[in-house]
Amino acid sequence: MKFSISKDVFLEGLQKVQHVVSSRTTLPILSNVLLVAKEGRLIFTTTDLDVGITGSVEASIEKEGATTLPAKRLVSIVKELPSSEVEVTVDAKNYATIKSGPSTFKIIGLSDSEFPPLPDFEGAKTFKIPQADLKNGLKKTSFAISTDETRYVLNGIFASFREGKLALVATDGRRLAMADTDLEFPASHETDVIIPSKAVQEIQRLLGDSGEVEVKLSDSQISFTVGDTFLASKLIEGNYPNYRQVIPGDSNERVVISRDALLETVRRVSLLSSDKSNSVKLIFSENQIEVTANSPDVGEAQETLEVSYGGPNMQIAFNPEFLQAPLRALDTDNIYLDLIDEMSPGVIRIDGSFLYVLMPMRVTN
């Protein structure tokens, strides 16, 4: 095969698919990117057997063909090429020659016939979702995905297509984030799936603020089509815990707090929380919250926030990172903090579809 292509376009195509390539793989072909040159386009595909992605860019094709080349090495070469035009020739033994200005690189590839095909979604349930809605929902929830591999059903986002809504939920057992959006689909398409963390990260890279994403669901796989990029992933099998049980009932107190002010305050104060006492305490009194952190071996910090609060004096402690995560993911001016008492979970809400349940930490006075 032989083609010429602009360096920036080549790099853009590679960067869209390179993150799927696993650094720890037993099959050499999985470290490679499949390149197919045909009909004026260069198509890139990578897979780790769980997640696969394919995209294409325009190229000037002199001779159609296909090969696979080491993905990470190819990206680092293309990044450093001296000229904006690149010419690539691949011989019958998958030996690739890359020429750009005064530079020539030769790299050894593997036959495209060994490359595992991406799954087929013929007859799958199809949903059309505005990209902005899915992007927004994933941003508001994905930070709460569990990284504990022993609880594998929590290593992804639970997506529930029911009653004209798409609800997205993530939890690691100590906090839970949930967002939903209205979505039209036939009742026969109602279903619940768990989308693995890696697929969530990859689709977040692809989603924009306009247009639609086409989502297809088969029994064990999900695919996303954004423009001419196609992402497929295995689903996590298993039963997601009943998250609705975790959401507390009516709160006793609701405090309206500036999102920015709370985020800044917690970030500053938490500089003096330590690994041992990784908590910040919120002490509520009339029209103010005192945010404090102290660790015997480091020192202490405190800062006062003016709020509208007329309830009883109380104090509750949270993990500072878990408290900051939703504040960073939201873009509203104010948040509502709903509290029952010092030992019950706190709930962060906004004027819109979002809910975040955070377990308090036990702190000795």
Image (cartoon, grey):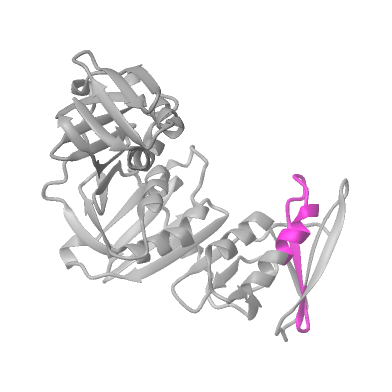
Between residue 295 and residue 119, name the one nearer to us. 119
Does residue 308 appear left or right of residue 354 in this picture? Answer: right
Residue 15 x, y percent position in the rendering: 39, 40
Counting the numbered discs, the total is 0
Instruction: State yes or no: residue 93 in magenta.
Output: no
Does residue 188 appear left or right of residue 56 in this picture? Answer: left
**Residue at the image point whose x is 49% and y is 37% from the top:** 150
Q: Residue furthest front?
A: 102
| Displayed quadrant of residue 304 | bottom right
**Residue at the image point whose x is 58% and y is 62% from the top:** 328
Is residue 119 shown to the viewer in this render? Answer: no
| Displayed quadrant of residue 321 | bottom right
Residue 211 x, y percent position in the rendering: 28, 64
Residue 117's place in the image compared with 272, above or below, is: above
Question: Which quadrant of the figure contains the C terminus?
Answer: bottom right
Q: Residue furthest top?
A: 93
**Residue at the image point whose x is 44% and y is 27% from the top:** 23
Magenta span of residues: 265-289
Between residue 188 and residue 48, name the one nearer to us. 48
Between residue 40 and residue 209, name the one nearer to us. 40
Instruction: State yes or no: residue 283 in magenta.
Output: yes
Does residue 319 appear left or right of residue 336 in this picture? Answer: right
Residue 239's place in the image compared with 95, above or below, is: below
